[in-house]
Image (cartoon, rainbow, N blue to C red):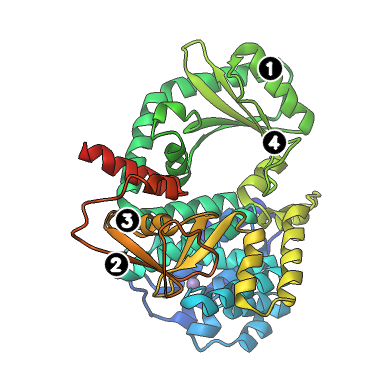
Amino acid sequence: MAIEELLKTISKNHPKADHDMVRLAFDLAREAHSSRKRANGEFCYEHNLAVARILADIKADLPAIIAGLLHDLPEDTECSLKDIEVDFGPEICSLVEGIGKLGSLKYRGLDRYAENLRNMFVAMAEDLRVVIIKFADRLHNMESLDALPEKKKNRIAHETMEIYVPIANRLGLGKLKGKLEDNSFRYTQPEEYQWISDLIKSELEKKKEYLRRVKEQTGYILSRNNIADFRIQGRTKDLYSLYKKLQRYDNDINRVYDIAALRVIVKDLSQCYSCLGLLHSQWRPLKGRIKDYIAQPKPNGYQSLHTTVFTPEKEVVEFQIRTEQMHAEAEFGVAAHWYYKEAGRSMPINSKQTAWVKELVKWQKNIEDDRKYLESLRLDVFQNRIFVFTPKGDVINLPEGSTPIDFAYHVHSEIGNTCTGSLVNNQIAPLSTELKSGDVVKIITDKNRKGPNPDWVNMARTNNARGKIRGFMKRMQ
Ligand code: MN
């Protein structure tokens, strides 16, 4: 039974965990949901189990996993928060309560959207686990989206991309972020998604054999040089992240070296550098590709050494070298903190991540105005990004400096190609207008228009819009 698999994962991360509590929570969820089913025909309680399994996989602690099993009971069943408190105590009860309070993060216009984000950050400041459970819930909803009507699928996928992904990224929840992003990508850009999945498949097929050889050789080199307790993993780039990278490199797959990389996980910091030296003495590194994210972590706290080397077969391979702890942080971010605490090892919660949340909460206390609130968010989580709205209240996330041209192409290429003008906050505005967070943008189109004006390339800020305009021009020649 599936509950047994959940217990197995839990035992791996938390050897002393109380299985009875987990079983009790599962039984309660199954009983409370009874035979109710979801749109895809699955029993409702199977969703609860799936959420708990995602949480166990990212090494969340036991109360979070149990709260995952119970997360929707007060809202969707006869089982009340009081019942949960009686059976499971105040900690789990307050997690479940927090998830309820968080509500659904739908963006129905500016007011609701800002309010939802605000709820999210208040919940974060009180207990980050609430947000992590919410993310696990969203991930399973994304994975079981297929049965829903087209329009709803699209709305949920955009919402995930615009709200959940940036926050997951900022919290360093790397694995969750990648999965949320790829599951949204599948619905927001189905054709591009298919193209990238096929591309990855064929590239991996080509590289499989030499990666296996390089991996074997690496293991040999490290053992021979007295590096003990290491492990080497192959890692494949997430789809959306590859898609974005390809856009930056004129869609030239030969310029992307990290589709498949080898990850070396070692015992301590000094071994990271020894390992880097050993690899370089064996294979020549590519100039400009050695990155020390240990000395200079990425803004979300990511740490590792990266290097790309030439192998004798004239192939290039990217290596990522890190300690177990850096690995756990890169994959699970704040979620792994509790795991390390329980395991009795010290893993200081990434101070950058918590300081950021605290700062934000301080900010929002002083900000009543929704527009200013969005503005303040922009300063941090959504660094250099703006949020603008469609007339229906859908939110569109664009880089700073974007214009109605970028907006139009972000919504759909056809809208871009047939665009004749724009309204910003109900006022006619030139297509070169620099948009600000909170603007409501309406694109005026004329289906007889024969395509974009070449000058638009200079008015567009995003690669997406520029690429599509140039692509159109090329096809016309
Ligand atoms: Mn749910």
Answer with the quarter of the image where residue 87 lies.
Answer: bottom right
315 lies left or right of 309: left
Which of disc 2 and disc 1 is earlier in sequence? 2
Q: Residues within 10 Å of mark 3 (few under 14, many from 20)?
A: many
Number of the label disc, if any, that sits on residue 293: 4
**Label 1 Cα crowd, 10 Å radius (few <14 / some 14-19 / many 20+):** some
| Pointers 3 and 1 in contact (C-beta within 8 Å) | no
The residue closer to the viewer here, 415 or 333, is 415
Question: Residues under labels 4 and 1: Cα distance?
Answer: 18 Å
Crowding near pointer 2: few (<14 within 10 Å), some, many (20+)?
Answer: few
Q: Residue furthest left?
A: 448
Q: Which residue is mark 3?
A: 416
Q: Amino acid at mark 3?
A: Gly
Is 427 placed above or below 280 here?
below
User: Front-most of 176 and 249?
Assistant: 249
Q: Position of residue 135 (x, y in %)?
A: 55, 64
Which residue is the site of mark 2? Answer: 150
Quarter of the picture containing the N terminus is bottom left
Mark-to-mark CA distance, 3 and 2:
22 Å
Q: Position of residue 21 (x, y in %)?
A: 64, 71
Q: Is residue 318 visible?
A: yes
Q: Looking at the image, tell me whether mark 2 or mark 4 is earlier in sequence order.
A: 2
